[in-house]
Image (tube, grey):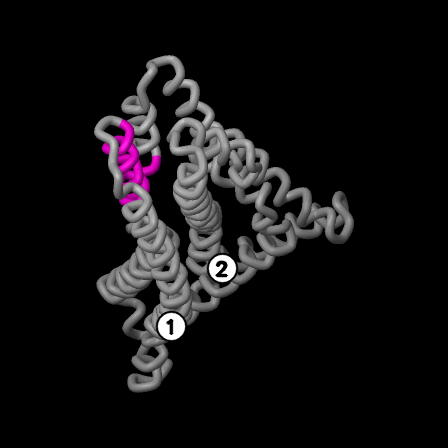
Amino acid sequence: MYIEELFINSVIVVGIYLYRNFKGENAGKYIFGEIQNAYEKFAPYSFRVVREKTKQLGQEYTVKQYTLQVTLFAGFAAVISYLYFYNIIISVIYALVAVSFVPYLAFLRCKKVYSEFIFEQIQVYTSNTIMEFGTTQSFVKALEGVRDSGVLEDPVLADVNQMISMSYDNGTIDEALEYMSKLYPFYIVKNMHQLFLQITNEGSKDAGEALENMSLDIDMLVENVYRDRLDRANFHKKFLQFGIILYLLVMTVQFMLGTSSYLELLKNWMVQGLLHLIIFVNSAFLISGEKYYNQNVGAE
C-alpha cells in the first residue's frame, strides 16, 4: 500500500504543478500540443498525408474531441483493470497503454476518411470522363474537359494532369492508362481504361452503348458502396457493445465467487496472468474490428 500511496501522491503533485503553471484549459491544451508536436515529428508519412486531407475536408477531430477520447479511454481502462486486479498502479499502467492507442485509431479514422474521399473522386473521374468522351470522341480531350471542370481535387487532379502530359509526350494513351490503373486499382477504373484503349486502338461503332452500360455499372457500384457503409456503421455499434460486454464478464465471476474469494484468487500469479491474457485478447479483438471497419472503404 505504501507504493500505491506514493504513486498517488506523485500524480497529485504533477497535477498541481501543471495547473499552477498552465491555468485551466491551458494545461490540457499544453499537454495535447506537446503530444501532437512529438507525433507530427515522428509520425509516418502516410499518416501525415491522410491527416492533412482530413483537415482540408473539415473532418479532423478538434482538441476538445481528442481530449474527450483520451479521457474516455483512460477512464475505461483504469476502471476495468481495477475491477480485475484491485491495484491502482496496474490501473494507471493500463490507462496509459489505452491512451497510447489513440494516435493509431486516429490514423485508422483518417485513412477511412481519405479512402472515402478517393473513392468519390474516382467515381467522379470515371463518370465525367465517359460523359466528356461522348462529346469530344477523344480520350485525352475528355480528360482535359474533366480537369477544367473543377470537379476534381488533388491527388486525383494531379494524376489526371500527369495522364494528359504522358499522352501528349508519348503520342499514345497506353502508358497513361497503365499509370492511372496502378495508382487506383478499382475495377471500374481498369474496365473503363480497357474500353477506351480498345476504342482508341481498334475503333468501335458500338462505343456509345458500351460506355452507357459502364456508366450504369458505376452507378450500381456507388449504390452498393454507400449501402455497405451503412451496414458497416450499424455493425460497428453492435461490435463495440459486444466488446465492452466481454470486458465485464469478470464481474460475473466475482458475483459467483464473492469479492473476498476473488481477492484470494488474485494472490495466485497464474490467475493474474490469465486475467492479463483475457484483457489482451479482448483488446486485440476490438482493435482488429476497428481496423476492419476503417479499411477498404469503397474498394471492390
Task: Decide which of 95, 179 is in the foreground and name it.
Answer: 179
Q: Where is residue 61 shown, x and y percent of the image?
A: 58, 51
**Residue 238 bears which disc, if any?**
1
In reply to whether residue 122 is colored magenta, the answer given is: no
Left or right of residue 64: residue 201: left
User: Nearer the observer, disc 2 or disc 1?
Assistant: 1
Task: Decide which of 178, 245 is in the foreground and name it.
Answer: 178
Determine the residue positioned at 68% across, 42% down. Answer: 30
Residue 160 occupies quadrant? top left
Residue furthest out toward the front: 205
- Residue 85 seen in the figure: no
Residue furthest out toward the top: 169
Badge 2 amino acid: Phe
- Residue 256 seen in the figure: yes
Q: Where is residue 111 shown, x and y percent of the image?
A: 43, 45
Q: Where is residue 254 shown, x and y percent of the image?
A: 34, 80
Residue 184 drawn above or below residue 282: above
Q: Count residues near mark 2 (Cα–Cα under 10 Å), then give few for <14, some for 14-19, many for 20+.
A: many
Q: Count residues near mark 1 (Cα–Cα under 10 Å), then give few for <14, some for 14-19, many for 20+.
A: few
Residue under circle 2? 73
Earlier sequence position, callout 2 versus callout 1: 2
SS majority, magenta: helix
Residue 252 occupies quadrant? bottom left
Q: Is mark 1 on a helix, strand or loop?
A: helix
What is the count of numbered marks? Answer: 2
Magenta stretch bounds: 184-200
Residue 26 drawn above or below residue 256: above
Badge 1 amino acid: Lys
Task: Decide which of 110, 7 is in the foreground and name it.
Answer: 110
In reply to whether residue 191 is colored magenta, the answer given is: yes
Determine the residue positioned at 42% across, 39% down. Answer: 129
Left or right of residue 36: residue 174: left
